[in-house]
Each structure stands twice: as C-alpha cells, then as structure tokens.
Amino acid sequence: MAIKPDLTTDCAGIRSPNPFWLASAPPTNSGEQIMRAFDAGWGGAVWKTLGTPIQNVSSRFGATNYRGTAAIGFNNIELITDRPLDVNFREIAEVKKRYPDHAVIVSLMVETREEWKEIIKRSEDAGADGLELNFGCPHGMCERGMGSAVGQEPKVNERITGWAKEFATVPVLVKLTPNVGDIVPHGIAAQAGGADGVSLINTIKSIIGVDIDRFVPEPRVGGLSTNGGYCGAAVKPIALHMVGALARDFTFELPISGIGGVRDWRDAVEFMLLGAASVQVCTEVMLRGYRIVEDMIEGLTDYMATHGFATIDQLVGKAVPNFSEWGELDLNYETIAKIDAESCIGCQLCVTACHDGAHQCIHPTGDGRVPVIDESECVGCNLCQIVCPVPDCISMVQVDNGFAPATWNQHIGDGAPLRPKKGAH
Amino acid sequence: MSRPPSARSEVVFDDFKPAYTAGQALAEANRCLYCSDAPCIQACPTGIDIPEFIRKIATDNVKGSARTIFEANVLGMSCARVCPVEVLCVGDCVYNHMGIPPIQIGKLQRYATDIAYDKGWSYFSAGEDTGKRVALIGAGPASLACAHALRRMGHACTIFEKRDVVGGLNTTGVAPYKMKADRSQDEVDWILSIGGIEVTTGVEVGRDVSFADLERDFDAIFIGFGLGPDGWLAAEGNKLAGIHGAVEFIERFKLGEVDLDGVERALVIGGGNTAVDAVRELKGLGVANVAMVYRGTEARMSGYAHEWAAAKLENIDAIWQTQPTGFARSGDGLEVTAVKLDADKTPIAGSEHGLPADLVLLAIGQGKLGDLVVDLDGITAEWGRLIVDGDGFTGRPGYYAGGDAANGGKEVVNAAAEGKAAARAIDAWFAADNSLRSPEGGA
Ligand SMILES: Cc1cc2nc3c(=O)[nH]c(=O)nc-3n(C[C@H](O)[C@H](O)[C@H](O)COP(=O)(O)OP(=O)(O)OC[C@H]3O[C@@H](n4cnc5c(N)ncnc54)[C@H](O)[C@@H]3O)c2cc1C
Ligand SMILES: Cc1cc2nc3c(=O)[nH]c(=O)nc-3n(C[C@H](O)[C@H](O)[C@H](O)COP(=O)(O)O)c2cc1C
Ligand code: SF4
C-alpha cells in the first residue's frame, strides 16, 4: 500500500484519533460504556446530555420495519440524562484520565444564564474536550423551553450560544434540530453566537406507528403516547441534505459534525464528502453495538488509500462543489436505461415500474422474459434500475444527442438551445 | 516443489457448492443477524469472527472481511471450501432454531477469500528476525498454519515434505468437487509469500534426515506428518489387481490420470468420510454402478449424514451390515465374498454371498505414524496417535505436534487451529530462553 492514511481528526478544535464519535444518546450514558467504546475503537464520544436530571417513561423506543428488515427507522421519547450530575462529572473525569487522547464532548441542556455558567464550569473542570449545546431534542424538553424550542428560534439560539461562549474555554458545538424549514439560518445563528462548530442532525419529530387494535400511537405508555424523535438509517438523506446545505452556504464557515443514519464506513464517507469533519453515530450502535467501528475504521482507511487521501481534511467537503442548484444542471445531458439480457432474471419489475410509475417505455417481449426498452421514449429517470433486484443488470447509459450542454439558467438567460423533450406527449 | 500437472482426472468435477456471485453474496450477507457471542464462532475450531467478516461483506469492505478470516485462520480459503460447515459453523447458526435456512458461512467465506486471492491483497509480514529456526515435518495444513504463525513472530522455518507436492491431504485428498489440487497449491503459494519459510520437498524425515540432524540444526521441531497409508483388510486375495487403498487411489486421480475404462461396477469398503467421498468420486469419474459396503447401519456410519445424503441423490447404493471376507478373480473382474452382520456386527451364519466388482477401494481408515517418533524419549503415542497437551507439546522439550498426527484424523480446520496453537507455544518456549540446539553447536 502506497500511503498509510492518517485518520487523526480535528473538528472545531476537538481532536480525536479518528472521525468516529458516538452521538449523545444511551450509548454514551456512562463512563463504563464510553470506555468500552473507546477500547472498541471509537475516536470520541458526546456524553448523554446533562442538565437537571429527569424522569423517563417506560416504553421509550419504537421502530419502523420494512419488508422484513427490522428498524430501518427508529424513534424515541426519552429525555436527557436521568443520572445525578455529580456521578456524571466524576465519570467524565475518570474517562479523561484513562483516555487522554480520545475526545470527550459533554452535551448540555439547561435554561438560565446562571445554569449555563455553572454546568459549563463543571464540565470543563471534569476535563471535557468540548461542549455540545443540545438545541435539538424535539420532545419533552422543548415543552420546558429547551431543546428544539431553542434550536427553532435563531435569536434564542444565538443568545444562548453567546452565553456558552462567554463561559467556555473549550470548543463549543451547537447541535441543531432538523425540525425547521431551512437549516441555514440556524447554523448562521450559531455562528453569530460565536460557536466553534455545529453538529446535526438531532432527531426528527415523528410518530413511529399506531397500535391499530388499541387505537394508541407507539411507543405506548399505558394508554397514551406522544410524538418522538426519528433517527436511524431512514433519516440519512435528510441529514445529508442539511449538512450539505450548510457546507455549501458561503456565509457559513464553521466545521460540521455530521449525524443521522450512519451505519457503516460508506455512510460516514458520504457525510464527510458533503462537509462533515467528524461523524456521530447513535442508532446503529444501539442496534449492533460498539463493535461496528472496526469495519468503519478499516473501510475508511482502505477508501482513503484507494483514492489517495493521506489525511481526513483532504476528503472533507470533496463533494460540496458538486452539490448545486437545479437551475445549474445540464438539461441536455441524456441517459437511457439498458438491460443486460444475460443477467436479467425475468421478474419484469421494471416493466411494471415503468408502466405505472414512469413513462411506459419498457415492454415485455413476445418470447422469453427479458423486457425491451423503447429508447426513443426512455427519459432516463432511473426507476427501473432502482427496482431491479439484480446488481448491474440495468445500467443508465449516457447518449450523445448532439446538443451542447445547456442549463435552465443559460436557456432563460442566453436562449441556449435545449434538446427535444422525451416522453412528454 | 512441483505444481500438479494439468492432465488430471479430477478436472472433470464441478464445484458441488458453486461460488457466489456478488449479488448472491450480498443478499446472504445481509441476512446475517450479526449475533453477539455467536455460536458459529464457538463452532469454528479457529474461532473466526464470522459475524464480523460477514458484516464487512455487506458494507463492501471485502478486503477487511478477508483480513478478519485470515487473522484467525490463514487457511481460510481452503477451509471455506472443504470444511464440513453443516456440522460446524452453519450447523450452529441461530436461524436453525427458527426453522429458517442457516447462513451459508462457507460460501461467504469463499467469496471474500477468493477476491482477496484474485486481487493479490497481502495482509501479513514476517516479524523481526529472532534468529530462531524451526523444523516442520510435512507440508500439510498443520505445518503451514504453524509456520505462518511462527514467521509472523520472526522465527525462521524449514518444512520437510516427503512428497513432491505440498499442501498435504488438502492437495492430495479432499474431494475435487470441493477443491482441486491446483487451488490448494495456490493457497500454499499465498501462505509462503510471507517469506522466510523454506520448503524442502522429496525429503522424508526419519529416512533422509534424522531427528538427530534436526536437533542439531533447529531450535524446535513441529511434527505435522499426518496419517499413514490406507489400512488393509485382512482377507484372502486382498492383494489382487483391482483392489486399492482409497486414499492412495484418490491421490492418483487428483494428481494424475486414472483409467477407468471397463470399470462398470465399483465397491468401496467402509462407512467413514473417505468412503463417502470415494463413492461420489468414482461416480463422477464415470463408473455406472457404485456402492458402499459397510459393516454397520446407515444410522451408525461415521461419514457425515449430509455427505451421504448428497451421495444418495447421485444414485449411489449402499450395502449395509455386510463384511467382505475374501476376494477372487472372476473373468475380467473380481468376486468379493461377504457375510451379513447382525446388529452387534456378528456374522450371520449361512449369509455368505458374492458381490461382483471391477474395482474395489478400501476405505477402512489410515495407519498412524506415531511409531516414527516414539523412540524419542518423552514422546508417547496411543494407537499410533501422538499424545500432546492443549498447546501441541509432546512431552519432549522442543517437540510439538498438531493436525492428524496428533488428533488421529480430523479436518483441515483442526490442523490449522492446532498448528497455530503450537506456534504460540513454541514462541513462548523460546521466550523462556529455550532451544534444542546446544549453545556451542548453534549456527
Ligand atoms: C480422502 C480424504 C478426504 C478428506 N476431505 C476433507 C474435507 O473435505 N474437509 C476437511 O476439512 N478435511 C478433509 N480431510 C482431512 C484433512 O485432509 C486432514 O485432516 C488434514 O489434511 C490434516 O492436515 P495435516 O497437516 O495434519 O496432515 P496432512 O494433510 O496429511 O499432511 C501431512 C504431510 O506430511 C507429509 N509427510 C508424512 N510423513 C512425512 C515424513 N516422514 N517426512 C516428511 N513429510 C512427511 C505428507 O506427505 C503430507 O504432505 C480428508 C482426508 C482424507 C484422507
Ligand atoms: C434513544 C435516543 C436518545 C437520544 N438522546 C439524545 C440526547 O440526550 N441528546 C442529544 O443531543 N441527542 C440525543 N439523541 C439524538 C442522537 O444523538 C442523534 O442525533 C440522532 O439519533 C441521529 O443519529 P442516528 O441516526 O445515528 O441515531 C438521542 C437519540 C436516541 C435514539
Ligand atoms: S433492552 Fe434492556 S432495558 Fe430495554 S427493555 Fe430490554 S432488557 Fe429492558
């Protein structure tokens, strides 16, 4: 191997041996857990949010299953730490003593300026390498004027971030809620308040399901339920978009810690390419354990070596310049679907998908079960490729239609010629 | 060391368990539950972290997947093909308890390790030279696993192999529908690529080289010479043409060509795994009528039930509770005389009968080679099997053993595990400042 990639990470001034951090959640509830996680290979951990300890309900989680796969989405109605603060701080100090090179970030959520001052001091005294302000929890805490109630109001976010920066000497990350229309003003508010970086996303307001015999939403607490926070694999696209939206915004300059639906090294790489300097994981660890990090480290290292990245900062943000606006896309770029008759198994899922969900241009053939594509009608939407169960059987192939590239903006501005529309009769 | 010739009768066989395509591997890998403290790991003699290697296939980290396999078992490529997974890892998959087909661990392991071989990924480098030299007897799985582990610790290794080909029974014995000789040779090459393992073929220890020679030149000795020749049936006419030892016959068609022209009917005597392999092999080589002749009942045969089930699907017969008592020429072929046995394996009076055959293979067990070394003080053998402790130590300082020679004849994966354990024990013995070589005689 030509290069041995260096995974050492610096996210907003918080250093860790690799970019993989545990998100603030049950896997970071206690020092004993976090030390086991560090032994398994995690580079950092954001401690379960500290504040005035709360009382949790019984029955806290729910999950979305899809075609036999358990928990592609996950939801919870638990609150911040329920353990006494001095126990938490004692354990933080112990972890830092034993693992000086790993990142311990303490997540915080309190109300008044005085409370912020005190809890920040205690966190730093315990040895925190950084602080994460939890402005994101969408249930339970917002009713008390904390969590997403703060994250949804840029002015409040900026003010409280300002307080934290006034008292803190270690880097401050602001954890953003995704329960907003546009994430950018909220990242900007954190920046205006002086934050050193942002983490996102926290969980998305959700109801995971309804018990159709008892007529009660889930998870059921006796005869009632409430909305919870959605996370896990299913939320990754939303999180990727929010991370990318901040990373490409010219006025936003802070480092980002990416969170939401990360299961393996590939997900992590995607977040990093869209601008995340570190990546946090909660649900996949809850479902499979700390051990998943071995594959994450190995996979990332191998990926970096293959692509010639020597250090983490060489890949962070690599895909950001290619995340653009619709008006900048080339309308004359044309692809069509091709079916590899050799590997086709004849399920004809693509036929149904194209007929009912696209442009009626894949047809069953007379003999055999390999469908044919009417290339003059194929709009290149990808639907058939998405439903095909055989890897690499349907490929989307670029065709040369003789038209020079032209974006919508160019067309409107300079009258650049567009190719004739396909499938639009 | 010579590669198996390309003209070999075994090449007619297809894989009984064909390789996975990428799509198949992904679908199967995604089915794995990634159990904690998984029963499949416990069932693997080399303790491969199976859920981890499977997860790595699912995340497209195939390189890491193969690393997980090889770290535990450097013979992971051949084991993927030859292990009786039905009674090991796959047999213990928790899905069996749900009545859901268990994960095809062997096929997934083959997928990852084949890719690693094809891509030429290398994972291991030799440890810093310790100046210690270990002699290993036999170039089978046990010695190869032992030597590779010793090299990672920095000890120099020399393997003495009496045959021209290396790989032991992995090359000369395992059924060709599991793995052919050239693939086993690929594995040996791959293992030796760590460097610093010298292989001397055509040298039989005890005949061409003495143990005194080895003690003079090496710091420790690993005995991995496996089992001896096929056992022979004590019966009249047992030396007639057309009667062969099964293991010897298998070696012949794996390494060269056998002529089965005119062989219409073959009998294989025995009920163990070699017998079950042999009947399937003869069938695959084109013999129309093949039957296994076994003393006991189907329920009590020592060959694996899953292998016998596959044989039955290939239209292979069995003649149960039958004992051959003599062989005679009959026309171009042989007439085997036999008696029926009762449930206690006692001959039933008046049950003598004749069985025609053009070819007879004896698969009634292999001899054990322990006698070669029992004259050395401290080494003991029981029915020819070397007695060792859990680390392969024989009782004579500096002498370790593993594989078939010490376990009496198990699987490749046991040889791999025992070879590796012995390497650790040898390393610890060196660390405590021991050596077979006297200080003044040292090289
Ligand atoms: C017909 C048959 C089929 C089998 N099929 C399977 C299977 O499908 N799956 C499976 O897991 N296991 C199978 N086995 C068992 C498996 O092959 C053995 O358990 C395994 O090979 C043992 O490895 P080893 O290194 O101990 O011995 P071997 O593989 O027997 O290697 C010993 C080596 O030592 C050499 N040698 C012997 N004496 C000397 C000497 N004095 N000096 C120098 N060299 C010497 C031999 O030539 C040989 O190369 C099969 C065995 C047989 C007989
Ligand atoms: C059970 C549970 C408890 C959580 N508790 C907290 C918390 O105390 N503080 C916080 O900032 N985020 C909390 N989160 C949100 C996670 O830190 C993370 O932002 C979110 O789950 C998305 O990541 P994931 O898809 O990897 O789970 C919690 C999530 C779950 C599932
Ligand atoms: S996961 Fe543990 S704490 Fe939660 S319900 Fe099950 S046993 Fe109880």
Image (cartoon, rainbow, N blue to C red):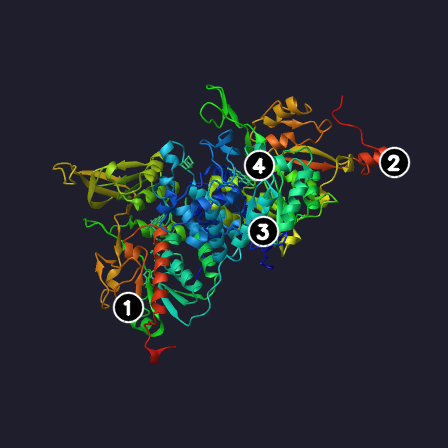
Residue labelled with disc 1: B397
Residue A276 in percent (x, y) is at 63, 46
Numbered disc 1: secondary structure: loop
Residue labelled with disc 4: A137
Tell me the crowding category of disc 1: few under 14, some 14 to 19, or many 20 or more residues within 10 angstroms, Cα based. some
Residue labelled with disc 2: A414
Instruction: Please state the chain letter of the residue tagged with numbered disc 4 in the rendered image.
Output: A
Residue A275 in view (yes/no): no
Q: Nearer the viewer, residue A1 or A342?
A: A1
Instruction: Please state the chain letter of the residue tagged with numbered disc 1 in the rendered image.
Output: B
Q: Nearer the viewer, mark 3 or mark 2?
A: 3
Instruction: Please state the chain letter of the residue tagged with numbered disc 3 in the rendered image.
Output: A
Q: In which of the image's four quarters is ligand 2 placed? A: top right
Mark 4 vs mark 3: same chain? yes
Residue labelled with disc 3: A130
Residue A270 in percent (x, y) is at 62, 44
The span from disc 1 to disc 2 (Cα, nearest Å) is 90 Å
User: What amino acid does circle 1 point to?
Assistant: Pro
